[in-house]
Image (tube, grey):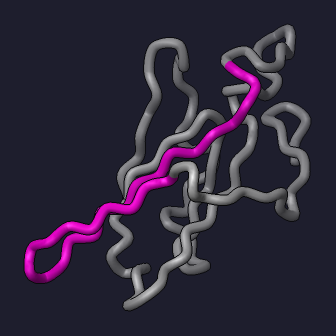
């Protein structure tokens, strides 16, 4: 699994935490680079249908940052990029990526900020 975000994220696959990361992908200078994480999710995959979930929040992308507590320093919309590459025993690779067909909704956490808290 490869993942990155405009904001910070936590990933779950079939209800289990992918890595236990918090605040991934971490601070970066978004105008110059975007960090991508790689996770081995082999043990979390099940035969048949699998479900990927994510919690996404402002982070350094659009949350309050710096001494002046500016907001939206890099952008106004958070976004998640995730791609799963499943290598089958016979060598074939199945790739599933986030995109227009994916859905989003508001979850239990309705507000979170690095300075103000959750």
**Relative to 20, 87 lies left or right:** left
Q: Nearer the viewer, residue 111 or 67?
A: 111
Q: Write the residue at 47% across / 52% down.
A: 82
Q: Which is more toward the observer, 47 or 109? A: 47
Q: Quadrant of the N terminus?
A: bottom left
| For residue 91, side relative to residue 72 (left or right) | left
**Residue 34 at x, y percent in the picture:** 46, 28
In the image, residue 77 lies in the stretch drawn in magenta: yes
Answer above or below: position of 101 versus 34.
Answer: below
In the picture as drawn, the residue positioned furthest to the bottom comes out as 47
Residue 38 x/y as whole percent: 36, 52
Name the spot of residue 73 as percent of width and height, x first: 73, 15
Check the image and report above or below for 64 versus 13: above
Q: Nearer the viewer, residue 111 or 22?
A: 111
The residue under the point 47% across, 84% down is 49
Task: Give, as a single range, the part of the protein colored magenta.
Answer: 75-98
Residue drawn at x 50%, y 66% is 18
Q: Is residue 56 magenta?
A: no
Relative placement, left or right, of 64 versus 1 is right
Tally of marks: 0
Among all residues in the image, which is located at the extreme front?
A: 101
Q: Is 39 on the left or on the right of 10, as rendered?
A: left
Q: Quadrant of residue 68?
A: top right
Q: Position of residue 115 (x, y in %)?
A: 84, 31
């Amino acid at each position: 699994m490869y993942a990155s975000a405009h904001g910070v994220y936590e990933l779950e696959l079939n209800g289990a935490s992918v890595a236990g990361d918090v605040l991934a992908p971490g601070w970066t200078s978004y105008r110059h680079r975007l960090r991508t994480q790689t996770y081995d999710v082999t043990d979390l995959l099940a035969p048949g249908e699998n479900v990927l979930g994510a919690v996404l929040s402002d982070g350094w992308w659009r949350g309050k940052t710096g001494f002046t507590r500016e907001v939206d320093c890099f952008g106004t919309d958070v976004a998640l990029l995730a791609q799963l590459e499943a290598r089958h025993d016979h060598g074939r690779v199945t790739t599933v990526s986030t995109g227009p067909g994916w859905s989003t909704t508001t979850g239990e956490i309705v507000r979170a900020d690095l300075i103000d808290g959750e």
